[in-house]
Amino acid sequence: MIKAKINGKDIEVKEGTSILDAARVANVKIPTLCKHEDLEATGGCGLCIVKVKGSNKILRACTTEITEGMEVITHDPEIVAVRRSVLELIMSNHPKDCLTCARNQNCELQRLAAEFGIRENHFPNVLNSRKHKRDNSAKGICIDTSKCIQCGRCVQVCQKVQDVWALSFLKRGIKTYLSAAGDIDLKDSPCVNCGQCSAHCPVGAIVEHDETREAWNALSDEKKYCVVQFAPAVRVAIGEAFGYPVGKNLTGKLTSALYALGFNAVFDTNTGADLTILEEASEFKHRLTNGGVLPLITSCCPAWVDFVEKNHGDMLDHISSAKSPHEMVGVLAKTYYAQKHNIDPKDIFVVSVMPCTAKKYEIGRDKDMSASGYPDVDLVLTTREIARMIKQAGIDFNNLEDRKGDDILSAYTGAATIFGATGGVMEAALRTAYNLVTGAELKDVNFKKVRGLKGIKEAKVDVNGTEVRVAVAHGLGNVDALMKKIKKAKAEGKELPYHFVEVMACQGGCVAGGGQPYGVTDELRTLRAKGLYKEDEHAEIRCSHNNPAIKKLYADYLGAPLSEKAHHLLHTHYTKRNKYQK
Amino acid sequence: MAKLINDIKEKFNKQYANIDKRIVVCGGTGCIAGGSQQVYEAFQKEYKKRGLPYTVEITDGCREHSTYISKSGCQGFCAQGPLVSVGDIFYTKVKVSDVEEIVEKTVMKGEVIDRLLYVNPTDQKHCKTLKDIPFYQKQHRILLADCGKINPEDINEYIAHGGYEGLAKALEKGQQFVIDEMKTSGLRGRGGAGFPTWLKWDLTRKPQSKVKYMICNGDEGDPGAYMDRSLLEGNPHSVVEGMIIAGFAIGATRGFFYIRAEYPLAIERVQKAIDACYKKGLLGKNILGSGFSYDLEIRFGAGAFVCGEETALITSIEGNRGTPRPKPPFPAVKGLWGKPTSINNVETLANVPYIMTKGGAWYASMGSGKSTGTKVFAMTGKVKNTGLIEVPLGITVKEVVYDIGGGPLHGDKVKAVQTGGPSGGVIDGDHFHMPITYESLQEIGSIMGSGGLIVMDETDCMVDIAKFYLEFCVDESCGKCSPCRIGGYQLLGYLNKITDGTAKEEDLQKIEEIATAMKRASLCALGQTAPNPVLSTLKFFRHEYDEHIKDKRCHTGKCKNLAKFEITDKCVGCGMCKKACPVGAISGEIRQKHSIDQSKCIKCGQCFNTCKLKAIIRG
Amino acid sequence: MSQGTNTREDISDIIKKWKKVEGSLVMMLHSVQSRLGYVPRWAAMEISKETGIALAKIYEVLTFYSFFKLTKPAKYQINVCIGTACYLKGAPELLKAIEKYTGLKDGQTSEDGKFSVMGLRCIGCCGLAPVISVNGKIHGQLKAGDIKTILDEATKGE
């Protein structure tokens, strides 16, 4: 431990702690626009400057480690004046069209400008000094480089955390601009629409592709029968937009709000999650007992699916053919539900509320995504978009009564709800796979080894004397490392390291997806996940195969897992794709 | 260890004894551009034609009584090139057509060709030898002396001149000896900041690490400076030797030369020098039997000035965009690929072999105070003698400009001298008596920098100069940190306003604000020092700024938007200006005073240059 | 600069040579440019494919360093030194004279690919200021009036 002083206050922190983090211990928040907890400090923005007592030298709090006995000064008239000048310089290279910006009231630059009390455009605007590019080519996210303040967070998250390498800075100096690999459109780049860039952008330079207008249009179209579903991770994050503590599970209020928006029916993607488990676990059992291709790798994350198709074309036979939960709910809405309620599926408009920007891409990725002859899902809205819609409609979210969704497609188990956190799919799948293979129920359904924020988690499970090795990876950088490990073992003809692998593109899983409320950190990831695990813990039914609604669905409509009908509606296939289209 | 070196030396000298005469053709870039390569070849042709014995490389079996026709590195007097010396006789501006005469008269008969001698502009005297030329008299040439003498492509000749003796001594006496000697010498980084070289090495030596790196910073990028280029081209072995000694001192396993790709000749010569060292066992495994193993290779810069900054240079060698990172951690702790690394400038390293052989005390005996030794400057601009000079630190600006440089080019007064390039500032006339040291320059708001020394006269506009340097920094900013990226651009915007005549007085306040933010909050030295040229000119030439802002005029006529040309009563109506004007803005009858239609005038200045009576005023 | 059948093989040899060397992307790009005169998209793609270095990274580097060119160079490359010495001694006037001759401003290339005009930072010939280079050949101590002669000479036989 290191003893030091921040503004005269004694603190004790771990060795290697930056001044920026150490200051937090002393309850001092040093302003920064480029440092994000998930990312390495680069010292780019120039706002976190501090001094050390007895020296006139200026240091960057984000990149300087605090050392024994250091006496840090975080504020003095000069520091504040320089920070203000730097902030004004950054603002002079930014459009300042706050009123029409997606990040209005949610923007880190705007917040700092307010905190510094900036009341005029101190320096002339020099926005024309660099190339501006609007890239709306990708389905999930949009880039407007004119708003970019070149903090480098998106580039770092895309290159280093996700290992996707779609984004980069081109040119240098004042001419530096953000662009997809080699100045091509995002859609032609290795981008997988994970949206982590948008989640880390401090301003409105990268945002989700806003489709709220399309949702309003559908809702006002009398001919359309609008149904909506929401993903596990949405329920524990939506509250952040309405002042609830992080991780608060608001399934009932959200359902209520969606009805209030005018949807004819509200479904729960969790039902789809239970269904996914049935299909996927059956697939696993089949492969395990028939010598099929192993490890089986989960497929519910669309950014991951896009990633594997572009980067590991030789691994496609490992990927579970089961569609993702919301696709399953979508296709069932247009078949099973439509038949039951005698509605023409062409009139049904399915909206999915997702923590994810890649889901916007997923619904059109292949013709399999229109298994009924109509798109399984017509529109995907992120958590951020639905929060805006609720506010636009003037719905008093906080005082809504809890409501339940449409009973055919909204009953779920504890296994389904933990889909939203890293390791959740694996845990849910193991609970059911165990039953499918052994015919017995687990005594303890908790698999704590696959929970938590470690990048790659491994566990061994005894299934009737057979050791089943599983791994869970989240954050595409970790995923890529895991794939390389598997491929290496495969190439060397060694025993496969795993039988079953869960993959989520975003660190922490869907709770920290690219479409979730801003400001994600590990603390937030943990709290949101906690909200889900709590629901599982208290759930009456904690295994997907025991969900009565699922049982009824198979009995009434699908037959059995992996049946021909199930295959037709609930499964897909994968295609090797070029990483670069140009 | 020294035996191998001695053997080579003896062998060379034995062969060299066969040489009667030596013709040295300057092979510096300036002279090559002026055609010295052709001159060099012409000498060989002429000898062949006449059947005279000559040698182009000292190897076994040199012909007896032959002439050694050799190239040298840059001799510094670039404006007078191509330079050729025959024995002591020093010829300037030699053309291929002069070669026959030189061989006929000077080589064969010992006659001096007056026409080719340098004429001292102050007393019109012909200077027969280098020593007679004022440009060289006040210099103290150590690095440049060998640079202008030795064939840069011949390791044997370098050794014969005492080369690699320093290395042998260092290897024999050990790391501590090297560092102690360096400490005694007081040598400070010649790349700009002037950090003590011994300390840098000591800091890099201390961390425990199996792998350490040594880097030679040859990314010379200051506009108007070419010291490093000349040293790399002219005496590559001195830098290579410096690199090996430095590598030994810090315990490095591998070293890199980072050289601008725009310097192909330097790259070629350094590569040849490295190859020659491997052949002689001066690089590779177990150097001179000392147990020290060390490899050297070259990496190219690619046109990014910021890569002269050490952390940016490291990032560039690693194969990335050359963006700097904050210090600490310093490269001595965490450098190339995260390993302890020392980065030294070319000129710094070139000094090392001399310090090893002659001793640190010898080196410290030159210079002044904490600024010991000599420094190479590239003197350019409005001065009679431009070129590469080496002077002891502590020499005054006046001595440099007037005694070595020969004073102002066109009789106009020397207004200021700029040092430190885009990171530096100006020295105004009141400070010409000031001795040049790291400290004194810093005191007046400039820096030593890598050694650019630009002389400016009354025809140069100081606002325009500041703008020129700032433009350079804006172009070269890597863009990583906002104070430099945006601050520099904004600052340039204000300077443009000033030179356009649209600036207001309060803009000076904004200039100061931005300059402070850049100096205090920029990530690396490029941004931190980029405002220096502006601040320094503002300090010493505030009246020129005021003239632009308040009076909307630029008396030098450099700022075209503010320039105004008028014809005075001195005009005799010769009509020359009328003819010269490209836009027909001048009217007037012959033998009567002419006048300029200001609405048509494009301020090209042709009339001003044409008028022999100085009847046209500018401003 | 020929686009002969061996071009692709040469590029692939360059990649092979540097592939295993740590941090060699910049050197690889130098070699490609010295072979082709610029770094075309296909060569960047090839490097990416063979080395696994992302195209994003390759272009980050390519566009950062002013030495690298992404388009085919002109037949006559006129470079004007705008280092301090040359600037003071009239480089702006030389640029104007060159513009008069070629119709091109600093940084432009003519549509037919005949000329390109480029202002360069100090090329280390300050003693000869102001200087220009035409396809690498240096001409020093120039006046604006010399430009026509130099370019006429360089393009003789066109």
Image (cartoon, coloured by chain):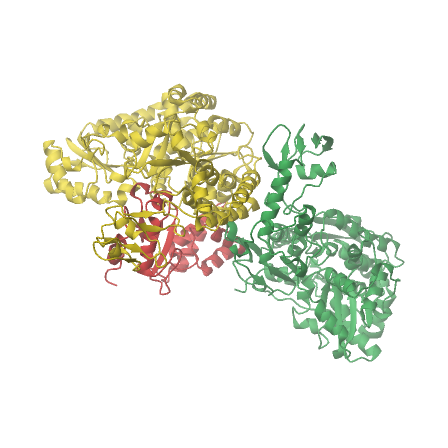
Q: Which chain corresponds to the colour green?
A: A
Between A547 and C154, the residue placed more toward the observer is C154
What residue is at 54 percent from the left and 65 percent from the top?
A581
State left or right for residue B408 relative to residue B195. left
- Residue B69, given in percent of the width and then of the height, sits at 20, 36
State left or right for residue A192 relative to residue A12. left
- Residue B541, given in percent of the width and then of the height, sits at 43, 38
Residue A578 showing in the rendered view = no
* Chain C drawing hue: red
Between B120 and B287, the residue placed more toward the observer is B120
Q: Is residue A156 above or below residue B377?
A: below
Residue B334 showing in the rendered view = yes
Q: Quadrant of residue B34?
A: top left
* Chain B drawing hue: yellow
Q: Is residue A356 above or below residue B514?
A: below
What residue is at 62 percent from the left and 46 percent from the top?
A87
Q: Quadrant of residue A220?
A: bottom right
Q: Quadrant of residue B429?
A: top left
